[in-house]
Image (spheres, rainbow, N blue to C red):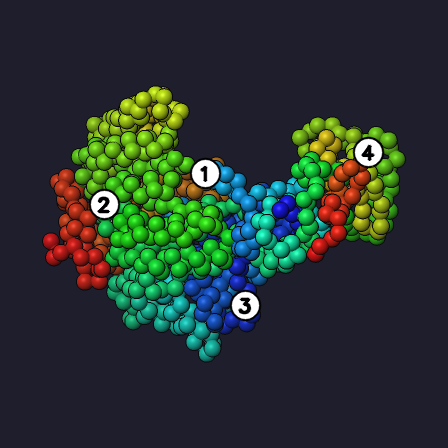
Amino acid sequence: MLLDRVEKPARYTGGELNSIYKQDAEINFALCFPDVYEVGMSHLGINILYEVLNALDFVYVQRAFCPWVDMMDELRKSGEKLATLEMQQPLDAFDLVGFNLSYEMCYSNVLAMLDLGGIPLLADERDDSCPVVVGGGACTVNPEPMAAFFDLFVIGEGEEVTGELCALLREHKRRGFVRADFLKEAAAIEGVYVPSLYEVAYNDDGTVRQVTAADGAPQKVKRRFVADFDAVRTIARPVVPYIETVHDRCTLEIMRGCSNGCRFCQAGYVTRPVRHRQKDTVIGSANDVINATGYDEISLCSLSSGDHPQIRELIEGLIGQFKEKRVSVSLPSMRVNSFDFAEQLNQVRRTGLTFAPEAGTQRLRDVINKNITDEEILGAAAKAFEAGANRIKLYFMTGLPTETDADLDGIADLVRRIQGQYFKIPKQERNGSLTITASASCFVPKPGTPFQWDAQDTVQRMKEKQYYLKDRLKIRGVRFNYHDAQLSFLEAAFARGDRRIAPVILQAYKSGAVMDAWQEHFAYVRYEQAFEEQGVDPCFYALREREYEEVLPWAHIDSLVSYDYLVREREKAYGGEVTPDCRKTCAGCGLQVRCTLHGGAPA
Amino acid sequence: MRVLIRYARSGPARYISHLDMQRVFARAIRRSGITVEYSQGFNPHILMSFASPLSVGYATEADYLELMVGAGEDLGSIGARLNDAMTGDIEVTFAGSLENIKGKLMALNHSAAYRIAFALENAHDCDKIEKAVHEIMDSGEYIVKDRKGREKDIAALILQAAVQGDTVNTVLKNSSVAAMNPRLFVDAVLDGTGLTAACAITRTECYACYDGKTVPFSDLCGKPDA
């Protein structure tokens, strides 16, 4: 038995509570997450799609996750195909195989899953008997590097458009599925991008000259978003994993979009407009989920939960309602200035405190529009320490545009000043000694943000900055972590890459790249060789500053945020000028007519 | 009210680890709405403890846990209510009162019975298995190395072993001072035969030692109640 020879066999057995079983659905959909079970089952989008699509009676969605490396070996040895958890059906037996692309470093896993599932890796090698391979999720802001492997992408929020896609496929199946015909009609659905219908031409300098859409396909593919977020179906009976997952609790999505406008943050732009779920709707969902799962923890999820207009009533309502059942409530995404709610949750004492100042100086925070001040951070820390917290996590980025050594010094400075707040408390009142964990990631310019034209630091420079900081953060009680510079470089090349990246990913996969997001499996050399042999220069994508006139590889994917606004934000960034929260003033991002916030007239 | 629960597991549920099994039960209890007692502190948890951890991959027909149930709950319906809230591969088969029993279940463990079914290619391999089992049983002392590389005399820990075709039924010591995982027995048997064969292991009963008597845990409750 295969399962007796692998680690954590419960990753592969299925049979969990609330798994859905159906017979004779017309459309069979394999919903795939290209990382291990514990990561995939923690992904909100996967859980939403599983329930929303299975609510359609003609669709049966089953789950599949990327097997861990030991299971990959076992599958290859035995010749068994990668199958779904519910019915143990191989991926190649499905009508649709959908992948969530949440992070660039999962690309090699997508290829592994296709490969193990018996599906040809390249879209143009699939005949009418093969499943339609669909991609969705965060990386579809620029799907171009993965275009060769997908029949189509769903751009933006998937819960409505995926159902439309299934309905269209049902029609085609009834009259005899012909891939090319289906894809052509699918391209007419708003939010559906069929890469094979677009031709890319390049200039001599390697930049994109133009992207031409075939007849009938839209010149620009518009991102989809759910207009009535409060009303749309969401999670009610999630599958309860047997094994412990990353987020093993009741997660309730209370808001989409974010009004803060941090200039480095892709999610903050490409999930606009800001939409809220009403307090009563959330509490209703909470009751459904808790009754159906037996979870003892509710976590409110959004990009910035403290900004929800009813956050106080919502938390009080949930705590009141679930106190008897001993269900705790937590809020993972808090901005410093909304810290006083966290206190109410008693969470601080228990788990410590997490801040993301992102940059070490006010100047640089203004550049990235992270609108918090040192005083707010220090004030919030002081409050938390008084409440008994003795652990604090700080997230920073290095390599942000305009960064100098003074900004790096600022990080060390801020850490010391936070420590100073702790020592202000009389010794006998302190809760043991303070541990500060400071993490620095390497800035990756992302498409869809005002920094989409910017150069990333070289790997060399990233490392120098890490060592510089490491040196300055040799402080008692302070732990310093930093990200792998080479991984960040690769992420940057993929994030803003074009279709010429695909052969590199394919070759790297064939030479063994898989589970790249797992440090113990990532080897840059596989990609280095692949870039070289394919004659593709990763620096062209990661390190080059673009002109505003350049046709960006993802220019035909319309995030709905206006180009002019992004240019304006970038210019303001370099001028050190902040943009207020959309709730205060509307900055005119292009979505104002469909925005629910009332920030006044566009600037 | 201190309640003893007996459960069985099969199918995919065999692959749930001990820690995960505790969580599976805690959630089922919460879903069932049965009133239970919680620990104090920042992270209150259900007052519940298992008699003996069950290894990943093993099925069971009779494993046990104890649970502190609210005084007003009806003992007779606890099993059915838990089953309504549980996934299909785990079934509660008994619930009884432990009110008059002293000591944690874990401290009462004496031994456990297992059914080991080998997947053999040839019928005459059954004879090899039988021979190897007898060799171990008759040896007086049979030293093997356990997972951590420690030497262990398994002959002293195998209380009973009977071979029937491709299946070995055995009772192994399972107390806090001397215990043995059936995997060691399997490895020793296969070593003795020179065979490589997969096997399915099912725990068929767990025994407690109480008042000088060795009995299935469920017998601690007096009259069976489910």
Q: Nearer the viewer, mark 3 or mark 1?
A: 1
Is label 1 in contact with label 4 (beta carbons under 8 Å)? no
Mark 3 lies on residue: A22
Q: Residue at x 62, y 46 (%)?
A: B1
Q: Residue at x 50, y 49 (%)?
A: A37
Q: Amino acid at mark 1?
A: Phe
Q: What SS does tag 4 mark?
A: loop
Q: Quadrant of residue A402?
A: top left
Q: For label 1, count other residues whose C-alpha is less than 10 Å away and answer few (under 14), some (14-19) or many (20+).
A: few
Q: Nearer the viewer, mark 2 or mark 1?
A: 1
Q: Which mark is residue A263?
A: 2
Q: Which mark is residue A529?
A: none
Q: Residue at x 50, y 66 (%)?
A: A60
Q: Nearer the viewer, mark 1 or mark 4?
A: 1
Return the x and y of residue A570 as percentages of the image width and height: 17, 45
Mark 1 lies on residue: B42
Q: Chain of mark 4?
A: B
Q: For label 3, count other residues whose C-alpha is less than 10 Å away and answer few (under 14), some (14-19) or many (20+).
A: some
Q: Nearer the viewer, mark 3 or mark 2?
A: 3
